[in-house]
Amino acid sequence: MKTSQTYNKLCEQCLNKYEISNNIMKGAYLLITELKNDVTIHIGKLGGIRFSKGFYVYVGSALNGLEQRIKRHLRKNKKTHWHIDYFLKHAKIINVFYKENTAKEECLIAKRLDKKLFSVSSFGCSDCTCKSHLFYGTIEEIKNIVDSFDMKIYSFDANH
Ligand SMILES: [Zn+2]
């Protein structure tokens, strides 16, 4: 009886592990955002940065729950933790793209965005050697380059 219980317990653990590894998406994501007005935003330790109105694309990654991370970005009330949290108090997310991957791909994507778009210096890249993880350009420029990335669209309520 005892053996059987132990066995069942182990199986449950295995099953949990199996489900976790299959349900938690890992990967990179892009947030395409619109800033309606020129505004100076205090971005954490970077201090005040002047942003021109227009379209911005941010690249990030989540290796422990991609969907949870995206949902967090879409949520309005939250503590400001990352640079992007400060920015999103003013800018509206209009499209989200993602790509499942076990490797950290965000910096490769950032380098590709940097070749085509302007960057906001030092934004979102405290933990890496990139120039930035936030870029701006026209919506056409942003969509053209994002189209070439082979990423999936993340659907959400646009009135979030
Ligand atoms: Zn980077």
Image: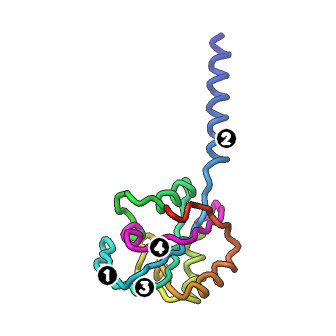
Mark seen at residue 53: 3
For label 1, the residue is 40
Residue visible at 67% across and 47% down in the picture: 22
Residues under numbered marks 4 and 1 in contact, where contact means CB atoms less than 8 Å apart: no
- Give the amino acid at mark 3: Lys
What SS does tag 2 mark?
Answer: helix
Q: Earlier in the sequence, mark 2 or mark 1?
A: 2
Which badge, 3 or 1, is on the more N-terminal residue? 1
First in sequence: mark 4 vs mark 1? 1
Q: In which quarter of the image is residue 27?
A: bottom right
Q: In the image, is residue 73 part of the stretch drawn in magenta? A: no
Say which of 110 and 37 sits in front: 37
Circle 4 crowding by C-alpha within 10 Å: few under 14, some 14–19, many from 20: few
Residue lying furthest front in this view?
159
Residue 88 magenta: yes
Q: CB of residue at label 4: within 8 Å of ligand 1?
A: yes
> Under tag 1, what secondary structure?
strand
Q: Which of marks 4 and 2 is nearer the N terminus?
A: 2
Rounded to the nearest angstrom, the CA distance separating label 2 from label 1 is 46 Å
In the figure, is residue 71 to the left or right of 148?
Answer: left
- Amino acid at dot 2: Tyr
Q: Which one is in front in this view, the residue at disc 4 or the one at disc 2?
A: 2
Measured as percent of width and height from the top left, residue 154 is found at 62, 63
- Quadrant placement of the N terminus: top right
- Nearest to viewer (mark 3 / mark 4): 3
Magenta stretch? 85-104
Residue pushed farthest top? 1
Helix, strand or loop status at disc 4: loop
Q: Nearer the viewer, mark 4 or mark 1?
A: 1
